[in-house]
Image (cartoon, rainbow, N blue to C red):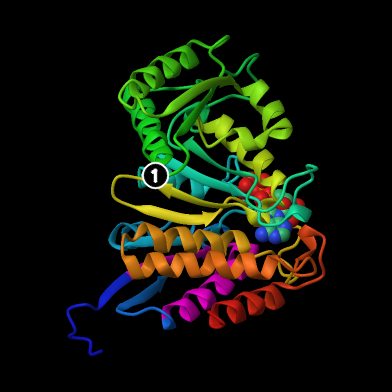
Amino acid sequence: MTPHDSRLRSFLIAVLPGDGIGRDVVSSTLEVLATVAERLDGVTFETEEHSVGAAEFQRSGDPLPEAAVVACRRADAVLLGAMGLPNVRWPNGKEITPQIDLRERLDLYAGIRPIFLYHEQDSPLKGYGAGEIDFLIVRENCEGLFSARGSPFDLQSEEVTDVLRITRQGAERICRTAFELAKQRRNHVTLVDKANVLPSMVYFRSVFDDVASHYPDIETDRVYIDAMALYLVQRPHAFDVIVTENMFGDILSDLAAGLVGGMGMAPSADVGPNCAVFQPSHGTAPDIAGKGIANPIATILSLAMLLEHLQDSEATRGGQLIREAVAQVLACPQHRTPDMGGFLSTREITDLILDAINQR
Ligand code: ATP
C-alpha cells in the first residue's frame, strides 16, 4: 500500500505522559500501539508528545501549557498518563489538578469508566468469574460538587461552603450519554443520586426522568449513593450503565475498580463534543513511581477505548486485539504486577501483552 492509497487513514494522537507512574504506563502503552498498528491494514498513527503536570509546572510555572491544550484540540484523540504530585502546589498551598483543568477546558463532560472482571482471582468478591462483573460508570465531569473547587475560601473564617451545581444542560447531556451507551450494552441505566436529601439531586433526577422518557426500550432504576456503595459490593452483576454526578462518580469509580483488581485495572475515557482523552482512572501513585512495578493494564485498556472511539473499523479491530491480548495474559494467574498480588514488573507484563498481540 502506498501513502497515496485512498484507503490509508492516519490518526493523530496527542500524548501527555505527565508525572509519576503516568510516564511508565504511557511508555508501555505506546509500545502496544506500535505493535497493534503493525497488525492493522490501512491505518497509521502519528503521536505527538507534550509535557504537562507537576514537572512541567516546576519547569515553566504552568502545569497545562496552552500548546498542549491546542494539541489536544487538534488531535483525533489524546492519550494521558497521570498528572500532579502531592508536594507540588500552587503558592496558596492547593495541589495542582491539571487533569481536572483539562476536562473543563476541553469540555470533557462524560467520564466513561468500564469495570470488567478478567479473572476470578482478581476480585475480592466470592463467586464471580471472568466477565461476570461488567458495568460502566458514566460520571459527569464538569460540574457537580467539583464545581466548588475554584471558590475562594478563608481558613480563618468560621465556615466554608461548597456548592453542588447541576445545570439542566449538564444533566441532560450526561444522562443522554448514559442511555446511548446502554443501547450498545444491556439496555439498563441506573441513576445514582441523593434525591432524598439534596435539592440539586431532586433536580438531577427529574432531568434523568425526562431523558429516560425518550428511551422507552431502556430499563431504568434509581439508587441513592449510600445504598449504591452497598449494592456494588453485594451484587455488582445487577448493573449495566450507572450515571451519576461528579463527586459520587469519583468515589464509586475507585470502589468499583477494587471489585476487579484495583486501580491498575480501571481504564477511562473523558469525552466531550469535540475532544476525547483516554487515561487510566488512577493517579500518579507517587508511592511506587520509579520502581518499575506500575501496572500498565488500565492505560493499555484505555488505548483500546481510544482506538474504538476513532470510528474506523480497523482501529476498532486494534482495540479488540488489545482486549483479547490482555485477557490471554491475565488468564494465567501468575501474570500479575504487585498491586494484583503478583511479582511481574511493568516491563515483564508489557512484554507478555506485546507477545500476545503478536500471536494473533
Ligand atoms: P488521584 O487523586 O490523582 O486519583 P490517588 O492519590 O487517589 O490519585 P493513585 O495514584 O490512584 O492515588 O493511587 C492509589 C493507590 O493505588 C496507590 O497505593 C498506588 O500505588 C496504587 N496504584 C494506582 N495505580 C496503580 C497502578 N497502575 N499500578 C499499581 N498500583 C497502582
What type is the residue that disc 1 sits on? Leu
User: Is residue 64 something that shows in the picture?
Assistant: yes
How far across and down, in percent of the image, does residue 260 sit?
69, 49
Q: How many marks?
A: 1
Which residue is depicted at the point 29% across and 45% down? Answer: 273
What stretch of residues is rendered in magenta? 12-37
Q: Can you identify the residue that label 1 sits on?
A: 108
Q: Is residue 354 left or right of residue 150?
A: right
Question: Residue 218's spot in the image, x, y percent?
Answer: 41, 29
Visible in this render: residue 285? no
The picture quadrant where one finds residue 338 is bottom right
User: What residue is rendered at 71% in x and 45% in y?
Assistant: 258
Which percent across, then down, holds residue 216? 34, 24
Above/below status of 1 relative to 271: below
- Quadrant in the rendering for residue 230: top right
Is 200 positioned to the left or the right of 281 in the image? left
Reply above or below: 191 against 47.
above
Q: Residue furthest bottom?
A: 2
- Asked if residue 147 lies left or right of residue 86, the reply is left
Q: Secondary structure at mark 1?
A: loop
